[in-house]
Image (cartoon, rainbow, N blue to C red):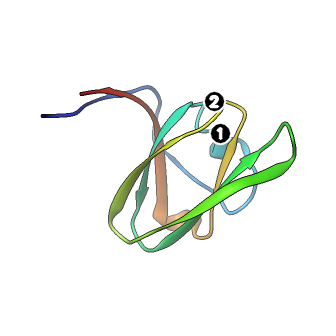
């Protein structure tokens, strides 16, 4: 079964600090591309706490579901791209 991905924003780099790019245009579903091994951390900006983190291998893609106010942070901004998406099967 094929997957259809609908792009909802422009691609941004995820920075190494809590900034506006980490919200990925207030996305609720984010497609993350890791060009090299990365540690991705999800932060709850409302509760001012860390939700969790995941390690991505290089040249891999992951979809991360989050609240629109949550922020993604990467340990290597130059190698982490993200875009807000919607998808169906």
Question: As drawn, which residue projects farthest toward the left?
Answer: 1
Task: Say which residue label 2 marks.
Answer: 26
> What quarter of the picture does the C terminus occupy?
top left
Q: Residue at x 47, y 30 (%)?
A: 9
Q: Residues within 10 Å of mark 1 (few under 14, many from 20)?
A: many
Residue 4, horizontal then vertical, whole percent: 24, 29
Query: Height in image: 71 above or below 79?
Result: above
Residue 76, horizontal then vertical, whole percent: 57, 70
Query: Height in image: 88 above or below 13?
Result: above
Q: Residues within 10 Å of mark 2 (few under 14, many from 20)?
A: some
> What quarter of the picture does the N terminus occupy?
top left
* In-image side of 68 versus 13 (left or right): right
Q: Which mark is residue 23?
A: 1
Q: Secondary structure at mark 2?
A: loop
- Mark count: 2
Corner quadrant of residue 56: bottom left
Q: Which mark is residue 33?
A: none
Residue 63, horizontal then vertical, whole percent: 43, 45
Q: Residue at x 65, y 46 (%)?
A: 22
Corner quadrant of residue 85: top left
Q: CA distance from mark 1 to mark 2?
A: 5 Å
Q: Secondary structure at mark 1?
A: helix
Would you say the residues marked 1 and 2 are in contact, meaning their CB atoms lie under 8 Å apart? yes
Residue 55, horizontal then vertical, whole percent: 51, 68
| Residue sitting nearer the eye, 38 or 77 | 38
């Amino acid at each position: 079964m094929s997957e259809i991905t609908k792009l909802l924003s422009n691609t941004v780099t995820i920075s190494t600090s809590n900034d506006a790019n980490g919200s990925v245009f207030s996305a609720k579903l984010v497609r993350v591309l890791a060009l090299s091994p990365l540690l991705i951390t999800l932060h709850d900006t409302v509760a001012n706490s860390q939700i969790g983190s995941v390690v991505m291998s290089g040249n891999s893609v992951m979809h991360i579901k989050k609240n629109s106010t949550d922020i993604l942070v990467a340990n290597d901004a130059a190698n982490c791209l993200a875009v807000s998406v919607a998808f169906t099967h």
